[in-house]
Image: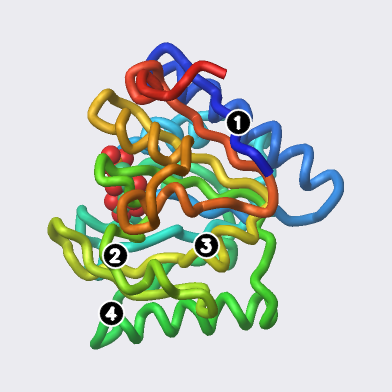
Amino acid sequence: MSATKKILKDLESLQNALALNIEERIRETVTRRDRFNLVVAGGNTPRGLYERLAARPAGSLPWEQVHLYWGDERFVPQADPKSNYAMVEETLLDHIEIPAANIHSIPTDTEQVEQAAAVYEERLRAEFGDQAPSLDLILLGMGSDGHTASLFPGCPVLEEDQRWVGASNAPVEPKERITLTYPILNNARAVYFLVSGARKADAVRNAVLRDLEKNACPSAFVRPAGELIFWLDQAAAQLVPKD
Ligand code: 6PG
């Protein structure tokens, strides 16, 4: 499916619009299926989005029917401030009534990072069976180098075409990462990129135009079976050709 761009004036407007869209998407989906599988993104950009979702009036979001997964994780203890779990816990989980059984975080208490990836894969397969699931919505960030989740340029995991979870290495600390791979990302019902700021404009252009090879822009190879929407502020969208 081709990509859609939603361009908002600034990050605050972007997070407001995205929070409303996600709330509506969840409520509409659970009227048809009794469960919404949401993959949360790490990093800093989505913090305000999670805070807005957490601030919705009690009962306006059916959290008991929402299952949360992580798109990637740093191989650090969940209590570490650099953990994506810790960020989502601080901005969202601590403020909503969601059953613990609905929170499917990536384990980081194994000896090796590869084991953590294997454990998460086993848990996903136990949950969904051996066909890559069509997760309802996957939220992704994007780095200025074109990475997304922890699919970084030059990482062997970019070539993974069977497993749903892999280990990777980031160019910045914490370097050891666990990430969902293209097979599961590209089977999603919907993928939203949430990107803000001029420093990412070049990466956004590359991801939208898809005119570079995988190592130059891993984000460009997220091509889901379902919807793909780039949620951008004007600064991040400045190099994207106007439709
Ligand atoms: C992570 C993220 C990563 C992030 C981008 C953008 O673990 O850091 O999964 O892919 O989304 O690096 O990060 P910012 O939102 O902090 O710019």
Mark 3 Cα-neighbour bin, 10 Å: few <14, some 14–19, many ≥20: some
Mark 4 Cα-neighbour bin, 10 Å: few <14, some 14–19, many ≥20: many
Which residue appears at 53% of the width and 84% of the height? 122
- Residue 175, given in percent of the width and then of the height, sits at 17, 65
Placement of 142 over or under 71, stated as above or below: above
Give me the C-alpha separation between circle 4 and circle 3: 20 Å
Give me the C-alpha separation between circle 2 and circle 3: 13 Å
- Residue 201, given in percent of the width and then of the height, sits at 32, 28
Q: Residue 234 appears in which quarter of the rendering?
A: top left
At label 3, the amino acid type is: Ile
Tags 4 and 1 in contact by the CB under 8 Å rule? no
- What is the quadrant of the C terminus in the image? top right
Rendered image: mark on residue 78:
2
SS category of the residue bearing label 1: strand
**In the rendered image, which residue does mark 3 sit on?**
103
Tags 1 and 2 in contact by the CB under 8 Å rule? no
Query: Mark 4 or mark 2: which is in front?
Result: 4
